[in-house]
């Protein structure tokens, strides 16, 4: 049983129409697609939908776990919700999901709890929330992946801050060499995200000589709508590097234009981070 199917069961049991059930959380048309498994609901919207219909989150997932015959499917759904909550930067939702997992009976429950605790620490920008043993286990978990798929890429990309620069240089180059030629747009997005993180790490550590290889990898990925934002960022970071060589004002000017474009596109946090990096390396 999928999340959409279980939502439908709850809705019918409360004798509500899809419009009454969706309320103002999501549109009735989108909700209809969720019930039919044609669209995926975000963790934020799912939890809000459950709350608005007086359904305890723990009860919902407990029932999902009981009815779903596939343990693997349960874990996939939980991991999707974890990732959604992380990208929404919501510690509250992650804690709610943690409560669900802690009450459940997934065979890999301890690994899931470890993952959620790590995400909460990253969002809080406070790795001291985690024991050294926990950080080491997460680092080992990623480092021991021999063939990275999309889930492995997401995990590494999100936890790159756990590693020192030299470890990241070793691991990121191994991953990129393995997957840079992938035709999957989703894989390309994750590779470009890793490249951008590495450019940031190298610039912050004044290891400018390490950046060219990553820029060359990025150039191997063709620009298309799905990866346009990532491709837009690459020249901004590389201009900061090139400015270190000859201090030509044009590199700063080009980066400032990109920063303005990012802010105008409604992503001020990205623009601010890039601006701070630019100011620190003028």
Image (cartoon, rainbow, N blue to C red):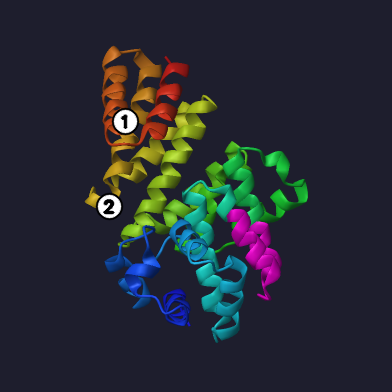
Give residue 40's position: percent from left, percent from top. 38, 67
Residue 195 located left or right of residue 30: right
Q: Nearer the viewer, mark 2 or mark 1?
A: 1
Going 57% across and 62% down the picture, which residue do you hit? Answer: 145
Q: Is residue 105 magenta?
A: yes
Near-viewer residue (121 or 169): 121
Going 42% across and 75% down the picture, which residue do you hit? Answer: 4
Is 282 placed above or below 72 here? above
Write down the region rendered in magenta: 94-115
Q: Quadrant of residue 263?
A: top left
User: What secondary structure is found at the residue carrying circle 2?
Assistant: helix
Residue placed under numbered mark 1 in the picture: 263
Is 205 placed above or below 182 here? above
Give residue 262's position: percent from left, percent from top. 30, 33
Q: Which mark is residue 76?
A: none
Give residue 277's position: percent from left, percent from top. 45, 24
Residue 248 located left or right of residue 86: left
Q: Is residue 235 visible?
A: yes
Q: Which mark is residue 226?
A: 2
Going 43% across and 53% down the picture, which residue do you hit? Answer: 177
Q: Is residue 39 visible?
A: no
Q: Main secondary structure of the magenta part?
A: helix
First reached walking from the N terminus: tag 2 or tag 1: 2
Give residue 5's position: percent from left, percent from top. 43, 80
């Amino acid at each position: 049983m999928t999340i959409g199917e279980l939502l439908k069961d709850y809705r019918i049991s409360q004798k509500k129409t899809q419009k009454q059930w969706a309320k103002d959380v999501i549109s009735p048309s989108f909700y209809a697609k969720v019930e039919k498994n044609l669209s995926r609901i975000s963790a934020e919207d799912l939890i809000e939908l459950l709350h608005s219909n007086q359904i305890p989150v723990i009860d919902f997932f407990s029932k999902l776990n009981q009815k779903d015959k596939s343990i693997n499917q349960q874990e996939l759904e939980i991991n999707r919700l974890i990732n959604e909550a992380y990208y929404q930067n919501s510690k509250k939702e992650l804690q709610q999901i943690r409560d669900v997992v802690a009450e459940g009976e997934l065979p890999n429950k301890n690994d899931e709890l470890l993952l959620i605790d790590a995400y909460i620490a990253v969002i809080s920008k406070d790795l001291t929330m985690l024991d050294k043993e926990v950080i080491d286990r997460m680092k080992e978990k990623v480092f021991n992946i021999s063939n990275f798929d999309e889930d492995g890429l997401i995990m590494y990309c999100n936890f790159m801050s756990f590693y020192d620069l030299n470890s990241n240089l070793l691991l990121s180059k191994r991953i990129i060499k393995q997957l840079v030629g992938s035709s999957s747009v989703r894989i390309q997005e994750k590779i470009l995200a890793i490249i951008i993180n590495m450019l940031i790490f190298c610039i912050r550590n004044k290891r400018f000589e390490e950046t060219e290889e990553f820029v060359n990898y990025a150039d191997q990925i063709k620009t298309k709508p799905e990866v346009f934002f990532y491709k837009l960022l690459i020249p901004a970071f590389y201009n900061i590097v090139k400015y270190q060589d000859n201090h030509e004002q044009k590199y700063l000017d080009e980066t400032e234009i990109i920063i303005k474009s990012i802010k105008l596109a409604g992503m001020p946090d990205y623009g601010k981070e890039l601006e701070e990096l630019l100011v620190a390396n003028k």
